Structure formats: structure tokens, C-alpha cells
Amino acid sequence: MEHEGKRPVLNNIFGYIKNIFWILLVLQLVPLFFGNIKNAVADVMSPKAHVGYLTIKGEITDASFYVKKIDEFAKDDEIQALLVRIDSSGGYSGTSQIIFNELKRFKKNKPIVALIENVGASGAYYIAAAANKIVASPQSLVGSIGTVLQVPNVKELLASWKVRFYEIHSGSYKTAGSPVKDMTDEDLAYLQTLSDDHYDLFVKDIAEARGLDVADHKKWADGKPFTGRQGLELKLIDKLGSFSDALDELKIVANIEEEIKLVAAKKPGSVMQWLSGSDDSDGSTQSFTDLVASHVGSALAKNVINCS
């Protein structure tokens, strides 16, 4: 009988909790609902030009999000142009080139303006170069056009721990750059060809995109980062300015007369990624040798100079 008396009380408590939950949920959704209605009415009463807004920040290691959003902006008939805001010292050369090429494809139908406020160097500048116009603050750092291969060597460290590491391989250059063996002259020469080829492609793409003479590449592509003001003199950027100046450039290149409404491309949070099943990782496991190989491969693919 005592337990039966407690049940109505527990039911009442759970009922209150459920009601509170629904009330809180409604309070969260109502402002969003009415805010959307308000924005929709405002757009009808005072039409605005929709411009895609893409932010590239930090190390550039994966192109998938950017490629997806660029494609969405390209297919959206309401989007008239794209503003790419950059704050990055670079990243993987392959990733940077993929984003560069996607922006070039986008630019065939809709103009792009890139804005560099602090740092747009190496792979990040690679991406900015795809834009119709580049606006940068005078004290920003731009350029840093070059490649670097960072190959660590831990052979002596392993020896001090009395750890022996055996590599069984086929192919003369399969272990070139291995962190557990001495690098031969042949290995060094081979790795230099990789760096040189990456560099040649980098320079060629920048020269073509910016209308620069490849023959003069040592002036603007020797690995140095330049200030925005220096970059303007070297024709690496088009204008010194800030966010407002970038919007003004957008109006010019896209023939926009009305006010601009930026449509931001936002990355989903970790919870949303988990719920949607989208994850950057493939869920596979790696052996120690795989991890070593991937680390060396990442170093070979990387063209980044930290300008922070």
C-alpha cells in the first residue's frame, strides 16, 4: 500500500518535469520562429543581395567541408557572389589546391572577393589567389609562397631506448624519408624533386591567377611572407582595407546596388556531426607503421609557414 501511494506522487513529478521540458523547448523555438518571419518580411519589404560567406581559419587539412559549401553556393540561384574570409598560415598543399580549383570553377559564373585580416600565407594565400579581388589589411601577412618538407628522424632516440625497428620493403625509394633510418643522398635528391614539383605547380597557379610573370617568381615566391602593404606593391593583393572595403569590392565585381546579406557557411558542431553520421575519420585503425607512414606523407604534402 505504501508503494501504491508513492506512484501518483512520482507520476506528478515526472509530469511536471515533462511540462517544464516542453515549455523550455517552446521558449527556445519561438524567438527563432518569429525571427525567421521577421527576416522574411524584411527581405520582401527591402530586398537584399545574397552573398555566400565562407571562413577559412587555422590549419588547412581537409577540403570536404569547403568543397561542399562552395558547390551549394554555386547551385543556389539566390547567391550572387562569394566572400572568403581567411585567417590561416596554410596547410596541406593538396587540400589548398583542391579548394583553389573549386573556387576557380565557382568564379566562372559568380565573382569572389577574398579578405585577409591577419594571415593569409602559403596554402591559405593559394586559396585567396583564386578570387577576383583580394583585400588585405596593411599589417596582415600574405604570400609565403613556397613548400617545405619536414621529415623527423628518431633513429638515435630509439637506439637510446634499445629499440630496434625493422623495415621490410620493396622498391628502392619506398622508405625515403623514413624517421627510423639515415637518409641517403639518393633519398634526399628524390624528396627534393617532390618539393620542387609542388613548388612549380604552386608558382604556376599563383602566376596565372594573379597575372604575374613566372620569370619574376623569385621576387614574390621565395617563401617570404609580406605585409599587406608590401603585397600590394608586388601585386599579390588588390586593395588595402577591411571588412567594409571587401563588401564594397563585392558590389563592384558583382554589380550589386542593394544592401548585401551574407549567407554564412557554418560547420556543424560535434554533436550534430554525430547525429548526422558525418565524421572526418573513417573509423579504421592504424598500425604503428601506418602511423609513421601517414606522418611522413603528411609532412611531404604540407606547404605551411607559421606566421603567427
Image: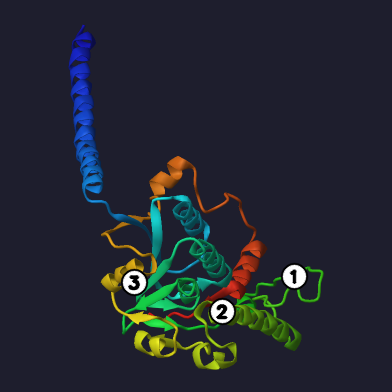
> Residue 118 falls in which quadrant of the image?
bottom left
Q: Residue at x 65, y 62 (%)?
A: 290
User: Are there few (<14), some (14-19), or many (20+) residues within 10 Å of tag 1?
Assistant: few
The image shows residue 127, relative to residue 277, as above or below, that is below
The image quadrant where one finds the C terminus is: bottom left
**Residue 45: x and y, percent?**
21, 47
Instruction: Determine whether label 1 and label 3 are within 8 Å by CB.
Output: no
- Identity, as a three-letter code, of the amino acid under mark 2: Glu
User: Are there few (<14), some (14-19), or many (20+) residues within 10 Å of tag 3?
Assistant: many
Q: Residue at x 63, y 68 (%)?
A: 292
- Identity, as a three-letter code, of the amino acid under mark 1: Glu
**Residue 306: x and y, percent?**
44, 79
Mark 2 secondary-structure assignment: helix
Q: Residue at x 40, y 76 (%)?
A: 134
- Identity, as a three-letter code, of the amino acid under mark 3: Glu
Viewer can see residue 274: yes
**Residue 264: x and y, percent?**
35, 56
The image shows residue 228, relative to residue 168, as above or below, that is below
Numbered label attached to residue 167: 1
Q: Is residue 12 left or right of residue 243?
A: left
Q: Earlier in the sequence, mark 3 or mark 2?
A: 2
Q: Residue at x 39, y 86 (%)?
A: 232
Mark 3 secondary-structure assignment: helix
Q: How far apart in space, not on screen, are marks 1 and 3 (Cα)?
A: 56 Å
Instruction: Determine whether label 1 and label 2 are within 8 Å by CB.
Output: no
The image shows residue 158, relative to residue 273, as above or below, that is below
The image shows residue 289, relative to residue 124, as above or below, that is above
The image quadrant where one finds the N terminus is: top left
Residue to which mark 3 is pinned: 249
